[in-house]
Every structure is written in C-alpha cells, then in structure tokens.
Amino acid sequence: MKKLRIYNFNFAILVVTLICPENVLSELRIKGLSATRATLYDPSHDFTCLDGSEKIPFSYINDDYCDCKDGSDEPGTSACPNGMFFCRNIGYRSHYIPSSRVNDGICDCCDGSDEWATGTNCTNNCYELGASAREEAKEKHDIQQRGYQLKLQYSEQGKQSRKEKQEKFEILQRERSEIEAVKLEREALKEAAEIPEKEALEKHRAMEEEIRSQRQASEKQKRDEEALAAFEQLDSNQDGVLTSDEIMAKPIFDQNGDGLVSEEEAKFFLSGQTEMTREEFLNTGFVLMKPYLTHEEEVASPPPSSTVTPPAEGGELPEIPEGETDEEEEDFDHGEADHDDRTEDSEVLPVEETLPYDPETQKIVDEAKAARDAYNEADRRLREIERDLKNIEDSMKNDYGPEEEFSPLHGHCFEFTDREYTYKFCPFDYASQRPKHGGSETRLGQWGHWAGPENNKYSIMMLEKGVQCWNGPQRSCKVHFTCGVDNVIMSASEPNRCEYEMNFVTPTACAPPTGSPDDLLAHDEL
C-alpha cells in the first residue's frame, strides 16, 4: 500500500484555501513554481500531471517523491530527475534550473530559494546583479539605438546610390546609342580617306624602290670599276687571269709579317685556288683583297703630319715626338687586325635615307591619320561606356538588403590582425589573409551570397571560391554580422581546414530597438 504522505505545508494550503481570500492565497505559492503555472496547481482538487499521464492527491505535490513521469508534481524538490525548479530572483532575471540542483548545498538562484531545506546561507544578491545587468542592458540598448540610426542613414545613402546608378545607367545607354552612330559615321570617313592614302603610299614606295635600285646600280657599277682597275693592276702580264705568282709578287699580301708572301697566303686570296679569272675576282677576290689594296694606297700617300723633314746641311736630325715611334710600331704589329676591321667596314652599306613625302602625298596621309584618330576616339569612348554599363549592372544585381542598407559598405575594406595574420574583408568583393610579418596575400573567397538562417538572412555573408588549399578544397569565408556603431572586424579564425570565419560588427546589423532596457530583465510575475 502506498505510504500516506501529508505535509504540514500542503495541509496549511488546503486549510487556507477554505478560509482566505484569493489575494492572500497568492502569497502562499508552491516552491519552485512560476506564477504562469500556478493556475495548474489548485489545492482544492486532485492534481493531474501536466503530461496527463496520472492524477494524484494534491498533497503529493513537493512531497519529495516523484509520482508524475514528467516530474511536474515535484517543482520544488530534487525527487524527479527531469524536473525543473523556478528561481523567481526578484530584482534580476527569473529562470529555471534542473531540479537536481535543489537542496544540494550550492546556491544556484541569486535569491537562494533553491536551498530552502538545507539551511545553506545563501546571500540574496539579485538586486546587485539586476543593477549590473540593467546597466549592461542599457548600454546594449543605446548601442542598438545608435546603430539603428546609422543603419537608417546607410539605407538612405544606399537608396540614393541606387537611384544615381539607375540615372547614370540610362544616360550611358543614350550616350552609347549616340556614340555607336558616331563610330559608324567616322568608320566610313576613315575607310574613304584610307583609299587615296593607300594609292599615294604605294606610289611613294614605288618611287623609293626606283631610287634605291638606281643607287644600288650606281654603287655596283662603281665597285665593279674599282675592282676592274685593281685586277688590271695585279694582272701584271695582262692575260686576264690572276695567278699565285702575281699575288706573291705583291708584298702587301704578306699576312704573317715575315716580308714574303707565301704560296699559302696567295691561295687564301685566290679562294684556295692557284689562279682566278676576272669574273671570279669581281665576285669574291676583290672583297678579300680590297682592305690590303686600300692600306697600300694609304701607305703610299702618308698624311702630312707623319712626314719627316730632311735636316739642313750640317744640321741635326729633327727629334721624333715622344711616343710616335711606338705607335707606328704598334700599328705595324697589329696590321692584320686592322685589315680585318677594314674588311668588316667595307661590307657595311650606307644607311638608306627615307624619301620625304611630297606636299600632295603628305596632305593625303595627314587627312587619313586624322580620320583614323577620330574613329579610334569614338571606338575608345564606346568601349568605356560599355565597361561602365556592365559595372553598374553588376552592382545593381547585388543584394544590398531590403532597404539598401548594406550598399555603403561596398567599395570599402576592413582589416584585423592577430598574432600571425592580417585579415581583410571587402564586403561584396573578397576576403583575404596575409602573413603579419610579410608575404603574399591569399584570397579566402569572393562575394557569393547571403547565408543567414531563414528568419535572419542578412546575418551571414558567404565568400567562396578562394585559393585552393594544398591537397584540399577551395578556401571559403563565412562573415557573421552583429550590431554595433562602427564597422569593425572583431575576430577571425579557421575552425575547419580551409574554412574561415569572421565576426564583423556593423550598424547594418542593428534591428530597431523595442521597449526599454528594463524589458530585458522582465519577470513573469510581480
């Protein structure tokens, strides 16, 4: 048989119910029970467990024995493992604690009501905590109020910006139509001007080619005449063939400086042969021999400054200036090198001078150039307009919030530095990371979409498709927006590999404040 359990407290409530008015009864509340649930506990009737599973005598309430499966019969004791004790905490926040903490010797409620049976000396500091909480709540309320006012300003700026972009977009569209017509017109003028230009330039190039051919023919004739004269001079027997013996008879062809022209040296000038015809000399031989023939002419006709004046009768020989003899000997020793240099110089053709345009051709060329410049200017302006239109269109596609409040953030960047890295966040653009003490920047992601929950979509911005991690996915960054009066990155981290998070404080996240700071400490009972 179930043990009879009637406690003085509950018996007193039963008696008082019969003789006391309702306002007096309200002061005799059941321990651990909130005022909002008090109507469910009527001492004049049996108690039905809140889950409806069982009906028990009211005297079983708070008898330290768990009768209801949901623990609703023991709100003020620790008998039920799933029970909850209500801390009234007048002056501070009311809240529930697990019933297992009731009468455990530890003060969990700031008013000490959870230790009603242990005799634990709990100090009621609810009013002190309430005062501190109210100050904190007031500060939070003020921040929210100021932040929301800034958000309204941001919204006005964003709406004005969208309006200006729309107006500029329409202006640029009209200008594009005008410039397209101008470009077509100037293209036609350019093509018309380039036809006579092409003809004039072709005529001018033909004239240049004719002059060049005449000059080349004249130079070739001069070289051939010079070569023939040299051949006649070297062909001592005038038989039309130049032999090695005739070459060996000319000391100017002594390459090693031994005073004699060897048969091998002669063959060098005869292209490895023992003789050379007049035609072969014109084609190859003269090119090899010309530097030496030219040197012979220079030696045969020394400059006046090197001439030594014979001494007067009975006089002394004139002094040779210091260094002059050494220079002459040096020139003699390096004669072969000088000959090589001259060989190279002799093969360098004179620079062709560009034939200037005649006045008529110059006028045609200038007109064509002016037409091209005008066309290029129209084409450049059209490309600029199309680029600006695309930028405006892309910007207007961005979701700047229901009231355009996030628009002013676009185009600005914010940084945060921790012990290792400096993080950068540019809303609607990208996020990055770079080593604090130098190094290249790594993109963590670019603007993707808003990723907040359904009831607070604009609380999280997702940046994706960043630089790929080594043997891993592409980096991404999730930015959490919270209310504040300034735009500041408060923290940055990498909770998962290649997945970054930032906490960004901004007025754009501030909701309109409701009530007063005291509402944050609202009680469910007086």
Image (cartoon, grey):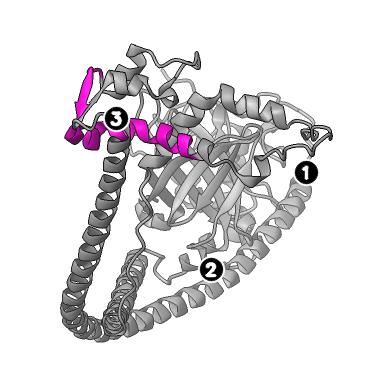
Mark toward the viewer: 2 or 1: 2
Place of residue 297 in the rendered image (x, y in percent of width and height, measured from the top left): 47, 39
Residue under the image location 50 percent in, 62 percent down: 411
Residue at (45, 76) in percent of width and height: 161
The CA span between labels 1 and 3 is 135 Å
Q: Nearer the viewer, residue 137 or 450?
A: 450
For disc 3, the marked residue is 236
- Residue on which the image places disc 1: 125
Q: Nearer the viewer, mark 3 or mark 2?
A: 3
Q: Secondary structure at mark 3?
A: loop
Highlighted magenta segment, given as a residue range: 272-297
Q: Is residue 21 visible?
A: no
Mark in front: 1 vs 3: 3
**First along the sequence among labels 3 and 2:** 3
Label 1: few (<14), some (14–19) or many (≥20) C-alpha neighbours in 10 Å: some
Q: Secondary structure at mark 1?
A: loop
Label 3 sits on what residue type? Ser
| Residue at 26 percent of width and 57 percent of height | 218
Q: At 56% from the left edge and 42% from the top edge, which residue is drawn?
A: 423
Q: Amino acid at mark 2?
A: Pro
Q: Closer to the camera, 79 or 85?
A: 85
Q: For marks 3 and 2, give the CA distance.
A: 118 Å
Q: Quick one: SS at disc 2?
A: loop
Residue identified by numbered label 2? 512
Whether residue 160 is visible here, answered yes or no, is yes
Height in image: 496 above or below 508?
above
Q: Amino acid at mark 1?
A: Asn
